Image (cartoon, rainbow, N blue to C red):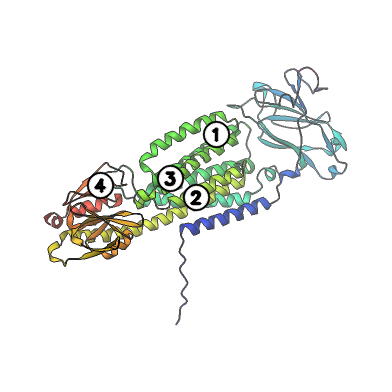
Amino acid sequence: MQTLALPRIRLTRNSALALMLIILLGCFAWVLHQPRALPQLQALTIKAWCDGGQFQTLPTSFSAAGCQDETVQPADPQGRLLWLELPFDLPSDATAQPLALFIFAKASSAVYLNGRLVGQNGQPGVAASEIPGQMDSRIYLPPAQLRPGSNQLVLLMSAQQGWFKLAQPIHFIGIGPYGDVSAYLQQYTGLGLLILGVLCTGLLYFSALALLGNSAVVSGHAAPIFATRGQDALLALLCLCAAAQLWLEMSRGLLGYPYPLHELRLCAILLCACGFGFALLWLTLLRYQPQRWRFWTLATLLMLLPLLWWLDSFDGRIAIATLLPAALAAVIAGTHWYQSEHTDAAGTEGAGSSAVLLLLYVGSAMVLNGIFQEILAFLLVTLLLCGLFIEQALQRQQQLRQQLADQQLILQLQLQLQQNPGAQPKASLTLTSAGKVQLVLADDIAYCQAARDYTEIWLTDGRQHLYSGTLKALEQELPGHFIRVHRSYLVNAHKVRQFRTTTDTDSGSGAVLILASGQQVPVSRRLIPAVRSAMLTPAAVAG
């Protein structure tokens, strides 16, 4: 019986980034193509307002003393009682369907249409006499009170309760077909719930990995190189903050609440945005600069706190709380990728793709300015997290492959340390330089060091030769007792005499091998425990 063999699909970082970009563009096109609900409402403009403390009843004129034109001084009902004048024109056929006045504001309000009270949201008043209304409300407008042409709408509005003042307490006042308030506040409820499900799934998955997984910690260093559990925990925290923020955003349209709770909701959203931003920064630091997480955390706080204090808009604060740490994370990842030629390979995996992913997120959010209370913002966040999930999976796969390679290398090192060098045949290496051919015995080579497209060969007597090839190519020509203990170094195991830790981080290492000639070769951080163990085996010590 014949079986059909399906081709294996290998997901690389470049293909993952391309896929994420295609999905991003597709989601943007789909969301932007959808018709919006809010244009169905006829927005009303406040023309003038009067102080409710001076006018106990409906003002007959908004040009009297104690009244202000809206263009001179905008109306702000926070801590005050105000009368608002909103004249509007109504077409003759507008009363064919039931109409309502929609008020989205941090305030209680009473509605007067053409001189008659038609409804109220809570009870506006001074201080203790006020009864808080809903943050978002609708007031039915009786057809008998509406007339074709000019109409006079007056609102008595107050916001006596709250912990701080908002820059824009009145979000929207308008007239439209009578219907559910949530239809105007939350247009993409289905898509929002789908995104919420994705975020909750990621939260459960990475929480389980963080609780059940293991992480390898390099001896002698406070920061783990493959801190898998820490990265899983931060990914879970990212999902938690994003899911909580999305739910808080959707709760306004799905649940509704009294206006005093609006400030608490905004603070909770800002807290989630800060948590998301710092979790993103810490994840990048844990991957690429774990030793400097305190410095970058303090630097981010010193930059972020003044901006949060200076901005008067919560939308701006929420945006900067996420985008500033994300931009710094992109700089950290990009810088680490740029300097990767001088650092250990284990710490540079995925730095370039992470930088591109973060820059795409920050750039898209800045281009689409003002979207952080819209579904596009959470599409961006979800796609960013999906990219980080893919990066984490690729890193985990790379870690497993590297662990297998390290185990083989250590077994080879132990074997070479136990063997008698004199019992092996003499191998040689042919070098060509300036038209001359030179034969170098492998036993005379102490170590080899990568130098871009060339390799420097250091002999035991201190002399140096240049090999016109990469370190990987040279490794294929040398005998098996030449071991790769660092990304840029190949050492003659027969010349190794001592293992020593060091505080010199210029080579991207924390330990060195001392050779019989006194020369030193750095050891990759991830190999330090295994190399130390190999050097301390009785057979190696005896050799």
Say above or below: 154 vs 513: above
Q: Residues within 10 Å of mark 4 (few under 14, many from 20)?
A: many
Judge by depth and name the residue closer to the eye, 424 or 295. Answer: 424
Left or right of 70 in this view: 482: left
Image disc number at residue 335: 3
Q: In percent of the image, x 58 and y 47: which residue is there?
A: 364
Q: Which one is earlier in the sequence, the residue at label 1 or at label 2? A: 1
Task: Please indicate, yes or no, whether residue 542 appears anywhere in the rendered image.
Answer: yes
- At x 60%, y 54%, the residue is 25
Q: Which residue is mark 4?
A: 511
Question: Spatial distance from mark 4 to mark 1, Cα to Cα?
Answer: 48 Å
C-alpha distance separating marks 2 and 4: 32 Å
Disc 3 to disc 2, C-alpha distance? 12 Å
Disc with the residue nearer the chain's start (2 vs 4): 2
Q: Is residue 1 left or right of residue 448?
A: right
Q: Quadrant of the C terminus?
A: bottom left
Label 2 secondary element: helix
Mark pair 1, 2: CA separation:
31 Å
Say whether disc 3 or disc 1 marks the residue closer to the N-terminus.
1
Task: Tell me residue 383's x, y (percent).
Answer: 54, 51
Helix, strand or loop for disc 1:
helix
Q: Which residue is mark 2?
A: 356
Front position in the image: 328 or 69: 328
What amino acid is labelled 4 in the image?
Ala
Magenta residues (range): 60-66
Q: Is residue 64 magenta?
A: yes
The amino acid marked with disc number 2 is Val
Residue drawn at the location 78% of the way across and 21% of the way down: 57
Label 3 secondary element: helix
The residue depicted at 23 percent of the width and 60 percent of the height is 482
How far, Cα to Cα, is label 3 from label 1? Answer: 34 Å
